[in-house]
Image (cartoon, rainbow, N blue to C red):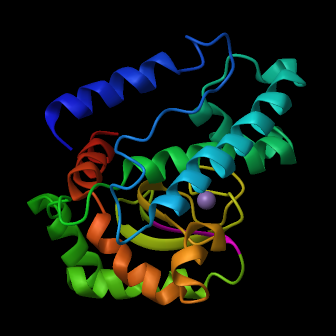
Amino acid sequence: MNALNRILTILALALVSPWAQGQSFSLAPLPYAYDALAPVIDEQTMRIHHGRHHQAYLDNLNKAVTATPALAGLSIEALMTQISKTGEAVRNNGGGHWNHTFFWQSMTRPSQGGSPSPDLLAAITRDFGSLDQFKAAFKSIGLGRFGSGWVWLIVTTDGKLKVTATANQDNPLMDVVSERGQPLLGNDVWEHAYYLQYQNRRGDYLDAWWQVVDWTVVSTRYADAQKK
Ligand code: MN
């Protein structure tokens, strides 16, 4: 992504923030074209995933928040960190909104994603042995997530990197998951994320996905996590 696109994306995200939209959450456009991730992720999958699945999570999140005045005005991050109190509808649909927004921002055109920053690579090497060993762990945990869910790279509360998985639309920010942390990267292992192109071959999807990971974004997230 070039600098102008980055600025436009930030502006678009600012415009659709709950404060600008009277407490309601909105679908931001993708930070790239629907066909930008092909051949790793095909255009039709991206259109359905963003325009129907993500939109449906948003619509149902807005309904749930509107029906619960105590939640009015809370940011999506604030909802995530107290999800034990918000009810199942916000857990499933707010999680769906947060996870997909994070997912779209984690990707870029094939081979345009650069590589981990020196600091991030050092932490990956420290905690996994090597970048390849980290990728193998990520694939293994992603394959091992039975049914629908997500696989994550997180910074734990004691500053270590760890690969975890969550069920359904849960994520590591939620106060209900067994392994909480600051997410740096997440991949969607629901069948809707890959089935049109990869059918039941989740492992092939997990292998190919590295080609579209935006390591610049992931490295920035790691640097930000270090400041917290
Ligand atoms: Mn999805």
- The residue that appears at 69% across and 84% down in the rendered structure is 146
Q: Is residue 155 visible?
A: no
Q: Is residue 227 left or right of residue 184?
A: left
Q: Residue at x 19, y 78 (%)?
A: 125
Q: Position of residue 58 (x, y in %)?
A: 70, 37
Quarter of the figure with residue 210? bottom left
Q: Is residue 149 magenta?
A: yes
Q: What residue is drawn where x is 46% and y is 62%?
A: 186
Residue 166 appears anywhere in the view: yes
Looking at the rendering, the stretch of residues picked out in magenta corresponds to: 148-152
> Vertical placement of 106 versus 67: above or below?
below
- Foreground of the two, 197 or 159: 197
Residue at 68% in and 58% down: 169
Query: Which residue is nearer to you in this view: 48 or 115?
Result: 48
* Quarter of the C terminus within the rendering: top left
Left or right, 180 with reference to 128: right
Q: How many marks?
A: 0
Instruction: Tell me where residue 158 sits by quadrant.
Output: bottom left
Left or right: 175 with respect to 120?
right
Compared with residue 91, is residue 22 higher up or lower down, i.e. above or below? above
Locate the N terminus and report the quarter of the image it occupies.
top left
Query: In the rendering, at what x and y percent does residue 30 appear?
Result: 43, 41
Dividing the image into four quarters, tell me where ligand 1 lies. Answer: bottom right
Q: Position of residue 81 (x, y in %)?
A: 63, 41
- Please tell me whether the stretch drawn in magenta is mainly helix, strand or loop: strand
Instruction: Answer left or right for 43 relative to 61.
Output: left
Q: Is residue 105 magenta?
A: no
Q: Position of residue 183 (x, y in %)?
A: 44, 55
Instruction: Tell me if residue 164 comes above or below residue 49 in the rendering.
Output: below
Of the pair 24 and 116, the residue shown nearer to us: 24
